[in-house]
Amino acid sequence: MLSSRWTSSTRSPRRRARADPSPHLLFLDARPLHDEQNYKQLKKGANEATKTLNRGISEFVVLAADTEPLEILLHLPLLAEDKNVPYVFVPSKQALGRACGVSRPVISCSVTTNEGSQLKSQITTLKDAIEKLLI
């Protein structure tokens, strides 16, 4: 049985520390990620993000901090750091799903590389912004 300290209304301290609202504004409100989906450069879900990181084609990874249980995502930051890929946590999986252009919640997504892509400059701008947050 869960203790009264960790009810569904309280949030884990890990989530609060990772889910800063400023990246939320940058990634979810400024420009949705569904442009990459039109060019087949957006992979949604923890399994797809893991595959892109392992294959070495991921530009950056976006993770939702309100994932239950959070442990299903915790391998992605470790893998991203091993592969030198920037990553960022955003507060809401529902908002991440909307930014990815789907009606369902998305717990993680990965933007992949494509040599002849018209989105290369936009992806580079977002990647640089994520790297500044990691410093």
Image (spheres, helix red, strand yellow):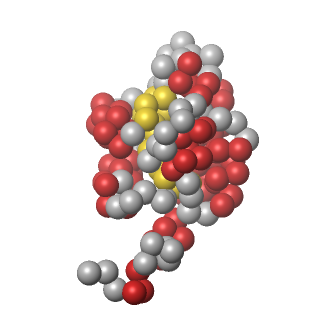
Res 62 seen here: no
Q: Quadrant of the C terminus?
A: bottom right
Residue 13 picture location, percent across and down? 48, 76
Q: Is residue 117 left or right of residue 76?
A: right
88, 105: nearer the viewer: 105
Residue 30 picture location, percent across and down? 73, 41
Q: Is residue 31 left or right of residue 98?
A: right
Residue found at the very far top of the displayed protein? 116
Is 87 placed above or below 21 here?
above
Q: Is residue 46 left or right of residue 29?
A: left
Q: Is residue 51 left or right of residue 9?
A: left
Q: Residue at x 60, y 38 (%)?
A: 99
Residue 49 picture location, percent across and down? 37, 38
The quarter of the displayed image where residue 71 is located: bottom left
Is 132 placed above or below 39 here?
below
Q: Residue at x 54, y 12 (%)?
A: 116
